[in-house]
Image: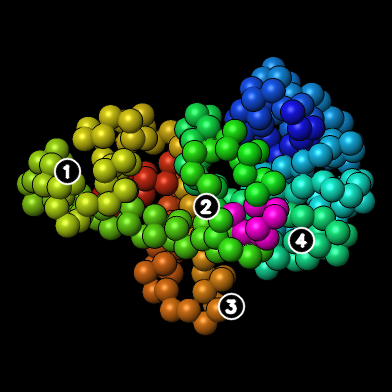
Amino acid sequence: MAKIAFIGLGNMGGPMAANLAKAQHHVTAFDLSDSAVAAAVEKGAHKAATAAEAVKGAEVVVTMLPAGKHVREVYEKDVLPNIGKGVLLIDCSTIDVDSARHVAALAAKAGLEMIDAPVSGGVGGATAGTLTFMVGGGDAAFAKAKPILEKMGKNIVHAGASGNGQAAKICNNMILGVSMVAVSEAFMLAKRLGLDAQKMFDVVSTSSGSCWSLVNYCPVPGPVPASPANRDYQPGFTAAMMLKDLMLAQQAASAAGASTPLGAEAAQLFSLFVNSGNAAKDFSGIVRMLDGK
C-alpha cells in the first residue's frame, strides 16, 4: 500500500486520515494540534513532529488546511522542498481558486502531479468514508489519485483542469447556503401562518419546493430525525465554514465578473449569524436567527 503523508487533522482531516489508515495505507500524520495527532495515531497513523518530516519518503501527500494562505505556505515551505520526483500531491482544502492554481503551477514547475480535491459531505461523510470529491487537475493525476480518494469517499468527479475542483465546491456551497436560507424562511413563515412543521415538510418534500436542504437537512426539529436541528444544532457543517465558502464564492464572482445577488445576500445573513456568537453551530441553525431568536 502507499506511503501517505497527511497534513491537517481537523474535524474533516482526522476522519479522512483514519480511513486511509484503515485501508492499510502507511499514513504519517501532522497537525499543529497535538491532540489531533494523538487521535490520528489511535486510529492507526504514525506521528510526525513537523510537516516537513511527514512528507519525507512519502509517495502521496494529502493536505486538509483552513485557507489558501495555509496551503501556499505549507506547500512552498514544507512540502515541495522535501519530496522527490513522482510524489502525487492531493489538496483537499476548500480555498480560493487562485491559490489552488498557484500551488498547482509550482508543483508542475517541479515536475510533480497535483490535484485540488475539495470535499462535500461534512463530518459524517468524512467519518463514514462517503464524501464527494470535486477534482481539478490533469487526467493522469486524477487517475493516480482516484484509488486514494476512493478510500475516503463515494463519489469522485473530475471537474477539469487545476482549480476546477475548487470552482465546483464553492458553486455547490453557494447553492446550499442560499437554499438553506430559503427553506428556513419558508418554515418561519409557515409557523406564523399556523402551519405545522411536519405538515409543511410533508407537502414541500413531495412538491416543487423540495431540495436537499429540506429533505436531508431540515432546519427545524422533527421532520428529519438525523438533522442537526434535533441535537441543538451541533454541527455537521459549521456556520463559520459556510460563511467561509460563501465569501470564497463572492470573491470568485467579483474576479470573474459574475452576478450572484442571492449568494451575496446569503453571505451577509450568515455573517450576521456567525458574528452573533454562532460560528460553531451548524449552519442550519440560521433558522433561529430568522425566527428572531
Task: Decide: few, some or many residues near mark 2? Use Cα within 10 Å; few <14, some 14-19, many ≥20.
Answer: some
- The tag on residue 230 is none
What secondary structure is marked by label 2? strand
Looking at marks 3 and 4 on the same chain, the residue that comes earlier in the sequence is marked by 4
Give the percent coordinates (x, y) of residue 122. 49, 40
Q: Residue drawn 74% across and 24% down? A: 45
Looking at marks 1 and 4 on the same chain, the residue that comes earlier in the sequence is marked by 4
Looking at marks 3 and 2 on the same chain, the residue that comes earlier in the sequence is marked by 2
Query: What residue does disc 4 label?
Result: 103
Q: CA distance from mark 3 to mark 4?
A: 19 Å
Amino acid beneath label 4: Val
Give the percent coordinates (x, y) of residue 163. 63, 63
Q: Is residue 105 magenta?
A: no
Amino acid beneath label 3: Ala
Looking at marks 2 and 4 on the same chain, the residue that comes earlier in the sequence is marked by 4
Tell us which disc is closer to us: 3 or 2. 2
Query: What residue does disc 3 label?
Result: 255
Tell us which disc is closer to us: 3 or 4. 4
Looking at marks 1 and 3 on the same chain, the residue that comes earlier in the sequence is marked by 1
What secondary structure is marked by label 4? helix
Task: Decide: few, some or many residues near mark 1? Use Cα within 10 Å; few <14, some 14-19, many ≥20.
Answer: many
Q: CA distance from mark 3 to mark 2?
A: 25 Å
Query: What residue does disc 2 label?
Result: 157
Q: Residue drawn 56% across and 56% down? A: 158
Give the percent coordinates (x, y) of residue 34. 76, 28
Q: Is residue 139 magenta?
A: yes
Extent of the magenta region:
135-142
Looking at marks 1 and 2 on the same chain, the residue that comes earlier in the sequence is marked by 2
Q: Is residue 170 left or right of residue 65?
A: left
Query: What residue does disc 1 label?
Result: 201
- Work out which residue is located at the far top of the displayed protein and give it: 42
Tell us which disc is closer to us: 2 or 4. 2
